[in-house]
Image: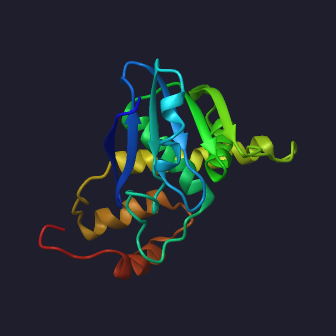
Amino acid sequence: LDMFSEVKFPVPWGHLAAKAWGSSEGHPVLCLHGWLDNANTFDKLIPLLPRDCYYVAMDFSGHGLSSHRPAGCPYHFLDYVSDVRRVAAALQWRRFTLMGHSMGGAVAGMFCFLYPEMVDKLILLENLGFLLAPEDTEAWLESKRLVIDRLLSLEAKQQTPRARSPEAALQRLLEANRHLTAEGGAILLQRGATETPTG
């Protein structure tokens, strides 16, 4: 475990970088660093851990060798949870161990709340995890998981926009927003659509 490899995972704004130790056949462990930190946090620890695991220490967006989010986009806590979900999907990990330090521990705790079926163990270093008031838990979890899952689903379907006739574009807009009238939809499309030679 003294040797590591660099890994990159594509995301819509660039890539998420990570360091990996061990055989990819080993038990998967995703390592999450703290605030103002990066994957090198785990350089001295990983060689001391069991050798039958595959350790992947990711750099959160804007940290280490990972791409920054676009200028003007804030870094919300839930975005870091989405980063974890993206990396797990790219690695095709259905169930794995999460090890988080400081902020990474809080992210790991929130990920466990949102995707408990994906985490077999949670290891927290200098962190208490993520806590919610019991009366808020179910609704919060459902809404946040839905946000992340929909975002990743849309990103997976990235396609070149299809050209439509003005009438078909209006019909599509009205189907997506049942509160709009045809007149209101036409007004929005004047500014929300671009006419091209094909539609």
The residue at the point 39 percent across, 26 percent down is 22
Q: How many marks?
A: 0
1 is higher (above) or lower (below) than 132: above
What is the image's colouring?
rainbow
Q: Quadrant of the C terminus?
A: bottom left
Name the foreground residue: 130 vs 5. 5
Residue 9 percent coordinates (x, y): 34, 46
Tell me where residue 162 sits by quadrant. bottom left
35 horizontally vs 150: left or right:
right
Asked if one can make out residue 114 in the rendered structure from this viewpoint, the answer is yes
In the image, taking residue 95 as reference, residue 160 lies left or right, namely left
Answer with left or right where residue 27 lies relative to residue 119. left
Mark yes or no: residue 150 visible.
Answer: no
Percent position (x, y) of residue 114? 64, 39
Expressed as whole percent of the image width and height from the top left, the position of residue 42 reads 51, 42
**Residue 24 image position (x, y, % from top left):** 36, 24
Q: Which one is in front, 137 or 57?
A: 57
Camera-nearest residue between 114 and 17: 17
Residue that appears at 58% across and 34% down: 98
Question: Residue at 61% across / 42% down in the picture?
Answer: 100
Q: Is residue 58 above or below residue 196?
A: above
Q: Hey, which quadrant is residue 171 in on the image?
A: bottom left
- Quarter where residue 146 is shown: top right
